[in-house]
Amino acid sequence: MAGNGLCKPREIVMRYLIYLSILIFTVSCSNASSTSEAIKPSKEEKYNWRLVTSWPKNYPGLGMAPERIADLVEEMSDGQMTITVYGAEEQVPAFGVFDAVSSGSHQMGHSGGYFWKGKVPAAQFFTSVPFGLTADEINAWVNRGGGLELWREIYAPFNIYPIPAGNTGTQMFGWFNKEINSLEDIKGLKMRIPGIGGEVLKEAGGIPVTLPGGELFTALQTGVIDATEWVGPYNDLTFGFHQAAKYYYYPGWHEPGPMLELLINIDAWNSLPNHLQVIIETATKAVNQDMLDEYLAKNNQALTELIEVHGVELRKLPDDVIEEFRKISNKILDDLAKEDEVISKVYDSYLKFKNNVSAYHQISEDAFVESRNK
Ligand code: CA
């Protein structure tokens, strides 16, 4: 090397142009397989990505899903790709995840689509809407019923590629310090309940409040709010809500099966070799199901503990209250679809799927579970 001496700038440019010409000639004369080798990223290149979330670091269920995706990707890629997972506020605020991935400041995020309803109102259908799809049903709609194509279409303008990434299953309506015996008891009720569920409560005469999870216990204990929803027995037990409220109400009509999302910056996604894209898709699909399994297994254990050890009083919402919430929900969703073309397109697909799958479930799962439990 020493004998070559230093090149002058013009020589460097010339050499570069000659190299480029050879490269173009080689590529254009090659067959398909060697073409892909020449232009695709090296299979040896290491990728170290950062993933921001809307959850406390390592929070049971919600926060563990992205950790498991990261572990699986590292193992399946034999260490070629590592993903560092950050809890909410560590790098960006809980509700700053979408913008971080959209801008490319972080390659990945893990969150819930209904948090972005201000920017992408239709995103709520890919998490949960009141009286909407259950976990199994939304998995089927998104993965096999045309939902995923719509989801990717509405996130593409934000330079984001979404993948379904977890589900809590049907949630609980939540924790109350007073009994709900009629619609009158909803009037003036100050409850933490986000999203369209909150709009329904407001329409029924209640006062919806939005607060992050970490502030809920104190707000409930000090009477700042009369009631709160969170997730279900597994997560609610970890927050100790049973020490601040007496009644635990069901069903969680407002969140029947919320799907979480892995968000990937599209430029970062396109920079990956195909096999790493397949690994990420496959690992995330596995975790999407694993998280649902985890919640089902842990929820029923936690519910038993809440009732038998902590003396929690389980209550079902009266039928007329549920009926009123359902009527209001349907009206709010219909009105939303009338106002917005994108929502209309998504809602149309969602509603058709819901009607068909409901009819099928009535004569399959619903009928079977009813006969089993009698
Ligand atoms: Ca919730």
Image (cartoon, rainbow, N blue to C red):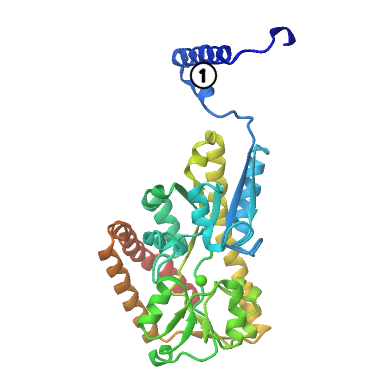
Left or right of 312? Residue 158 is left
Q: Residue furthest top?
A: 3
- In the depicted structure, whether residue 117 falls above or below residue 247: above
In this rendering, the count of numbered labels is 1
SS at mark 1? Answer: helix
Where is residue 167? Give x, y as percent: 52, 61
Quadrant of the snapshot with the N terminus: top right
Q: For residue 49, what is the image quadrant?
A: top right
Q: Is residue 307 visible?
A: no
Label 1 environment density (alpha carbons within 10 Å; few <14, some 14–19, many ≥20): few
The residue shown at (67%, 42%) is 75
The residue shown at (68%, 83%) is 309
Where is residue 183? Give x, y as percent: 38, 89
Q: Residue at label 1?
A: 34
The residue shown at (31%, 56%) is 342
- In the depicted structure, whether residue 241 falls above or below residue 286: below
Q: Is residue 207 visible?
A: yes
